[in-house]
Amino acid sequence: MTREEVVKKINQILIEEFEIEEAVIDPTGNIIETLGIDSLDLVDLVVLIEKNFGFKVVNEEMGGIKNLNDFYDYVTARAK
Amino acid sequence: MISGKNMNRVVITGMGIYSCIGKNVDEVKQSLYDGKSGIGIDPERKEIGFRSSLTGIVERPDLKGVLPRRMRIGLAEQGEYAYVATEEALKMADIDMDYLEKNEVGILYGNDSSAKAVIESVDIVREKKDTTLIGSGSIFQGMNSTVTMNLAVIYKLKGINCTVSGACASGSHAIGLGYFLIKNGLQSMIICGGAQEVNAYSMGSFDALSAFSLLESSPHEASRPFDKTRDGLVPSGGAATIIIESYESAVRRGANIIAELIGYGFSSNGEHISVPNVDGPVRSLRMAFDDAGIDVDKIDYVNAHATSTPVGDKNEAEALAEVFGKYKPYVTSTKSQTGHECWMAGASELIYSIIMMKNSFIAPNINFTEGDESSSKLNIPNKRVSKKIDYLLSNSFGFGGTNATLIAKNFE
């Protein structure tokens, strides 16, 4: 999967599954604060990443992820 | 706590219903009036090995765009029904979010399973061998208290908040216990009700007991409470909500009072886990009359628990005959139209009965053609009856021998 495809898919998940307004999605903003999601939403994000990209997000690997751009990179590197 | 004659009067100011015979009070009123059956066939049940594919047919509401995602994903199927029913009840009671946020309003709801969410989460764990792939909604959907925990958050409730599990009497006990809290001055308003999931997997273990009717060739005739040829119940579901409050609260708000709850009786059979008896229901009935402080001949209409099982209907008929003696009020089981709404039944049947009371008719006990030696002792109309109803009584019984009786009075 190309990074562009990953970005498109993740944004689609945020809009359709998490019902986040497209205009709110700022690749450089803090994920939790910018998107207004909580700890329970992160649980669901793990499930959706596994369903859509075929790998399991590991909490320990998420430490360095500060914004959506970091997350796009993380998923692109692991997507099957 | 207030005692003796100073206890609060408890009134009903709102009702909401979502069932196989209608998605709101108006639709249900028409179905009751017409003697319409809500029973049909679910082909999936045959595919997964059910003896009987008969069920109440209930369409799931689409709440996307109605509730935010976080409030939606914790709602199990029966929670969705309960939300829709509660919206209707609150609207009828003229209660808005501002009132709910500023006052101590509670919730007591009957529910005794949430099988689908539990089954689906176990399926994921078995397949993936990883609990973190279950998702966040499952725990809130799968607990027995799923309805009350979700509605308490949606409506920002500040009062009593718990679920009542009393098998097929859950809804009645929820209302009865709410009535006691208000009567004793501990709460001034409570959202009460009962909910029941309809999905096939939730009913598999019940079907296993051979308790369901096999009259699949005629779904509308399959639920035939008190009839001599009855061969079992038909499972069904949905949700029913009533808003109960102290008379003082209703008057202070200028609310439209629909009816008054005046009696709650309960008992336990202390015998078999699934076979009902006569003595337990008799004690529940007599306790309700003692609480209401009225004679049995005041009752104009009895909404029986009668589920269409051979032993259950017979024993309830005997109990009613014993308690009412020579006086023979009209007795029907609305389960002839709805099937057995299980955990929801006590609440829905109180609403069905109040709808009849407010519109001066008794819905027909459809499919009743000939009584057996016990039900022949009762006055069971199989055609609609025009009748002014001042007092009504509703029975609900359940596994483990739990019994509940509610008595309500019209308010004009």
Image (spheres, coloured by chain):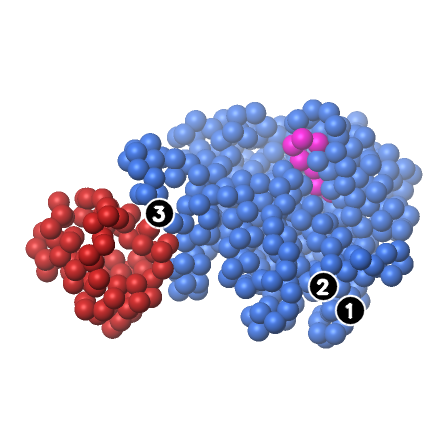
Instruction: Estimate the spatial distance between the alpha carbons at disc 3 and disc 2, rounded to whole Å.
Output: 38 Å
Which of the marked residues, 3 or 2, is nearer the chain's N terminus? 3
Task: Based on the picture, tell me whether residue B200 belongs to the magenta stretch.
Answer: no
Name the subunit of mark 3: B
Q: Are marks 2 and 1 in contact (CB under 8 Å)?
A: yes
Task: State which region is magenta.
Answer: B395-401
| Residue B36 visible to the viewer | no
Q: At 31% across and 43% down in the image, what residue appears? A: B133
Residue B135: which disc? 3
Q: Which secondary structure, mark 2?
A: loop
Query: Against A45, is B319 above or below?
Result: above
Figure quadrant of residue B161: bottom right
Numbered disc in front, either 3 or 1: 3
Figure quadrant of residue B6: bottom right
| Residue B141 visible to the viewer | yes
Task: Based on the picture, tell me whether residue B399 belongs to the magenta stretch.
Answer: yes
Do circles 3 and 2 both sit on a common chain?
yes
Instruction: Estimate the spatial distance between the alpha carbons at disc 2 and disc 1, rounded to whole Å.
Output: 8 Å
Q: Which residue is mark 2?
A: B188
